[in-house]
């Protein structure tokens, strides 16, 4: 019996290493694509440039270091945050169709941004801070309301409260759009709602990193334990976990960085829904591997979409349009593939 | 040594409406206890009290001679395992990944399972005869296989006491027999088992002791031969009942409609 256990255990170790290898491959791919995307843009000439062309032109070098690089870093952080949060929320709500915008965060941030554009002058920093605060307020309102609902279990109550809070903020955004100056403020609100990373510089990287990196790092460290939170409450309890407390902690760790990223990037949909699903297809449901896979694939997806957004046309294509378009296309592809097992 | 003892334990979800009333019993280590009673008699609540998820309003629960409240959450999770038949798994975990979750009590918050845990998980799968299923998705298993894998996950915790909530519900005869055999083997290995059921016949096959529950009160505690009596069961289930005895074991059937008519 012991021998069999040892042989089997070795086999399992080998398989774990294969999965880890896959994740490392994704990470390497992110690194390579990041370096490549530094050479892609509209200056000094459209599309891919040789490193020589950039280093020999001081203006091009300035542009790459001060604008293109921070924007690329932000797109990586945006994708990683949205997908990591997607994996976590899907696991703690035990529902593969949940995404980070669920708990009033996106609509809260949209309301905050519109408010800042109309009443607070709409400077970039003010808009970002107000949007982040309202995104977090959206989360707190959803949790507060869920505690007071008298219908269904905790997960259902949170989702219902999230829908209600999102609807309220969405109505608020409608009112603000109606009040906005149609020539100046309304286009600004609309553009913000479409999502994008134009005008990014190092200030924004410095603003998001203290919120995003520590949260993602802690989630990365506890990634295996996330599996336990997908079990029934009493089973999780029998395994020595306090499911209620741990779920709230993990919820805060995954949603607060989303609110901060949304405040910089606007509403960028589909990433948090589609990437966790693809990751599970590639490395399995175990969050020990599906969590880091989501981090890297999410970063890669947003980097890819944002590179198209800033390069393809003379003007900027809003990132949210591209992620929705490509995301919806991948979604349909997965669902219509004959071997697909659907969203389980 | 007594693995579990309850003295005058009461519990209510709504004050003044107790769902468990003054339940007392003591169970030796390495025995199988069946909690028998109709739906809503408090079986699952009693399991949650023994698990430590609920605290008794009144009375005392002792696990291996120590009061349950004196154990930390982590200590208790190494002593008591729980396997629920109704367990819903939302994602496509493989059987092995799922059974490895049973190693959580032995791992720190930042740790993932290592080779020692893999060995324990493989042994747990062997003890339930499900090692050949290790690479299958949990969602693709039959009811009986799934139940055995859920028990393997609880066994990976290396518990001295195993709680099973309705392990036999919805299983066909073959699966029931497979499961009962596994329970008997575990008893031989010294595991104390407490399972809830509304089916009196399964208790007579495998249980050493039966606790008959009605509306949260303990009607009787003792070996199946003493508890499975016509009058007691009729008053518990509220229907006319027939008890047949064959080869020293008792079997219980509801009187069917036609027979009742003939009697009338």
Image: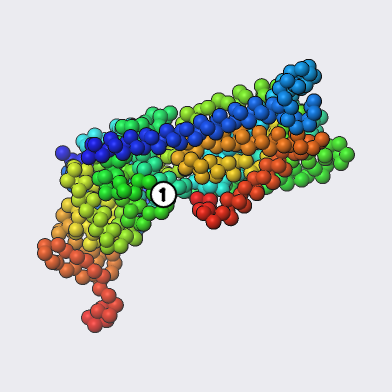
* Quarter of the image where one finds residue A147: top right
Nearest to the observer: residue B10 or residue A343: A343
Asked if one can make out residue A134 in the rendered structure from this viewpoint, the answer is no
Nearest to the observer: residue B230 or residue A237: A237
> Residue at the location (64% across, 28% down)?
A34
Does A242 sit above or below residue A59? below
> Residue at the location (40% across, 37% down)?
A15
Q: Is residue B141 left or right of residue B32?
A: right
Dot 1 crowding, Cα within 10 Å, few <14, some 14–19, many 20+:
some
Q: Quadrant of the N terminus of chain B?
A: top left
* Quarter of the image where one finds residue A118: top right
Does A51 sit above or below residue B107? above
Q: Quadrant of the C terminus of chain B?
A: bottom left
Nearest to the observer: residue A84 or residue A106: A84
* Quarter of the image where one finds residue B214: bottom left
Q: Name the residue under label 1.
A: B137
Q: Where is residue A203 in the image (x, y as percent from the top left)?
A: 71, 22
Q: Position of residue B254 (x, y in %)?
A: 26, 70
Q: Which colour assignment does the render follow?
A: rainbow
Q: Position of residue A343 (x, y in %)?
A: 53, 51
Q: Is residue B117 left or right of residue A42?
A: left
Q: In this view, does A53 lie to the left or right of B171?
A: right
Q: How many marks?
A: 1
Q: In this view, does B186 lie to the left or right of B130?
A: left
> Residue at the location (30% across, 40% down)?
B122
Asked if one can make out residue A341 in the rendered structure from this viewpoint, the answer is yes
Chain of the residue under label 1: B
Q: Where is residue A5 in the image (x, y as percent from the top left)?
A: 27, 38
């Amino acid at each position: 019996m012991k021998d069999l256990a040892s042989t089997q255990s070795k086999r399992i170790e080998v398989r774990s290493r294969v999965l880890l290898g896959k994740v490392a491959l994704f990470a390497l791919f992110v690194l390579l694509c990041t370096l490549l995307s530094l050479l892609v843009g509209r200056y000094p000439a459209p599309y891919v440039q040789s490193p020589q062309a950039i280093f020999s032109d001081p203006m091009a070098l300035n542009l790459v270091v001060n604008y293109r690089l921070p924007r690329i870093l932000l797109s990586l952080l945006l994708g990683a945050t949205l997908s990591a949060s997607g994996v976590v929320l899907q696991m703690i709500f035990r529902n593969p169709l949940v995404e980070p915008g669920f708990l009033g965060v996106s609509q809260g941030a949209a309301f905050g941004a519109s408010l800042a554009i109309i009443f607070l002058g709409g400077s970039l920093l003010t808009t970002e801070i107000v949007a982040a605060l309202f995104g977090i307020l959206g989360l707190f309102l959803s949790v507060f309301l869920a505690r007071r609902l008298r219908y269904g279990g905790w997960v259902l109550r949170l989702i219902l409260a999230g829908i209600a809070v999102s609807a309220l903020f969405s109505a608020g955004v409608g009112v603000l759009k109606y009040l906005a100056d149609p020539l100046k403020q309304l286009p600004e609100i609309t553009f913000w709602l479409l999502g994008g990373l134009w005008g990014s510089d190092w200030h924004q990287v410095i603003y998001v990193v203290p919120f995003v990196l520590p949260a993602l790092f802690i989630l990365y460290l506890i990634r295996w334990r996330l599996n336990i939170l997908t079990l029934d409450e009493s089973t999780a309890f029998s395994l020595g976990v306090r499911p209620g407390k741990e779920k709230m902690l993990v919820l805060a760790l995954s949603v607060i960085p989303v609110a901060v990223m949304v405040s910089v990037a606007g509403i960028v949909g589909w990433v948090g829904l589609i990437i966790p699903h693809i990751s599970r297809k590639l490395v399995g449901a175990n969050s020990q591997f599906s969590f880091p896979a989501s981090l890297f694939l999410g970063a890669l997806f947003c980097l890819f979409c944002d590179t198209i957004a800033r390069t393809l046309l003379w003007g900027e294509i809003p990132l949210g349009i591209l992620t929705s378009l490509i995301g919806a296309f991948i979604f349909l592809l997965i669902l219509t593939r004959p071997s697909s097992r659907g969203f389980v | 040594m007594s693995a579990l003892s309850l003295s005058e334990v009461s519990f209510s979800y709504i004050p003044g409406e107790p769902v468990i009333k003054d339940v007392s019993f003591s169970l030796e280590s390495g025995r199988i206890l069946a909690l028998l009673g109709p739906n809503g008699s408090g079986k699952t609540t009693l399991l949650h009290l023994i698990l430590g998820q609920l605290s008794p309003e009144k009375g005392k629960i002792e696990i291996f001679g120590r009061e349950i409240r004196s154990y930390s959450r982590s200590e208790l999770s190494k002593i008591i395992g729980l396997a629920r038949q109704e367990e819903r798994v939302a994602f496509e975990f493989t059987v092995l990944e799922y059974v490895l979750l049973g190693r959580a009590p032995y791992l720190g918050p930042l740790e993932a399972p290592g080779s020692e845990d893999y060995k324990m998980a493989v042994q747990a799968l062997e003890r339930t005869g499900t090692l050949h299923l290790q690479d299958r998705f949990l969602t693709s298993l039959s009811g009986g296989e799934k139940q055995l894998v859920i028990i393997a996950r609880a066994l990976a915790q290396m518990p001295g006491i195993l709680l099973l909530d309705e392990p036999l519900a919805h299983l066909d005869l073959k699966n029931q027999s497979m499961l009962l055999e596994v329970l008997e083997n575990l008893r031989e290995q010294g595991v104390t088992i407490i399972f809830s059921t509304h089916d009196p016949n399964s208790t007579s096959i495998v249980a050493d002791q039966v606790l008959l529950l009605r509306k949260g009160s303990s009607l009787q505690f003792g070996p199946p031969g003493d508890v499975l009596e016509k009058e007691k069961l009729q008053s518990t289930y509220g229907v006319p009942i027939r008890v047949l005895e064959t080869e020293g074991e008792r079997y219980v059937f509801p009187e069917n409609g036609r027979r009742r008519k003939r009697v009338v």
